[in-house]
Amino acid sequence: MNGLTIIDMHTHIWRGRYESDERQLLQAIERYGLRRIYVSALGGYTPDEETVDELNARTADFVRRYPDRVSGYVYVSPEHKNALDVLRRGIEEQGLSGLKLWVSTYCDEPCVFPLIEYCEDNGLPVLVHSFHKANGQVASETVGKNVAVLARRYPKAKLIMAHLGGNCYNGVPAIRDCKNVWCDYCGSIFRGDELNYAVEQLGADRLLYGTDMPGSFVVNIGQALEADITDADRDKILYRNTEKLFDRSFRL
């Protein structure tokens, strides 16, 4: 797209519509010339162990079919007794690249700790859904303060607070002093001034480009193009920071 290099580090395929979601993501890769996307499969707020296995198998299959353009996260429900085994299998056998935590538990619950320790030991990023809502907050849905607690417990872990915390004025201040937390601004929910605010508070080095696709790619890229930032900082957000973060040799 206009000569830009772009990595979309936050996309999904959803249970019950795997094929259509994959088609949309592949179309976006071709239409916008994306270098790579990072995908997690989701389905239900509290999936059972069999569903988690299905989700990760589908992600791994997508990665195997398009290894030059698609990478994946292992989705784990930390409250499951086999959660650490699921993570290990996803990384060591299924070829996935990071951990995805959603809403089945808060990210700072003790059951999450063994997963973070594994990721820390292996240089893996952890994408943490975080969303502060005025209405409709999901039970056990992480917000910025939970991410901050986890980050301070594990200062060497590479954590990503998704969606700028769902409300950037709530989420960003909570993790501002946690140098091991990056943020994406995906979800087509923010105005351009909120990306500028995040750059002012965190610096461009801690921001990542994601869209939450399938859905609108154009809104999210428009926010990056219209932000009051330098071309060098825009490149950091669009791809350079993600490349660095997913390099397993990069440690804090």
Image (spheres, helix red, strand yellow):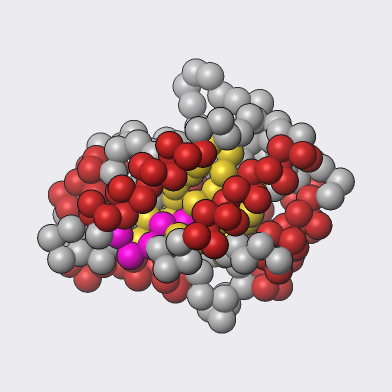
Most frequent secondary structure within the magenta stretch = strand
Magenta region: which residues?
34-38
Residue 36 lies within the magenta run: yes
The image quarter in which residue 46 lies: top right
Looking at the image, residue 202 sits to the left or right of residue 171; the answer is left
Residue 9, position as x, y percentages in the image: 43, 56
As for residue 26 lying within the magenta part, the answer is no
Could you tell me which quadrant the C terminus lies in? bottom right
Q: Residue at x 57, y 76 (%)?
A: 248
In this view, 192 is above or below 116: above
Q: Residue at x 50, y 33 (%)?
A: 17
Residue 186 to residue 177: above or below: above
Residue 38 vs 142, above or below: the answer is: below
On-image quarter of the N terminus: bottom left
Residue 80 in which image quadrant: top right
In front of the other: 148 or 245: 245
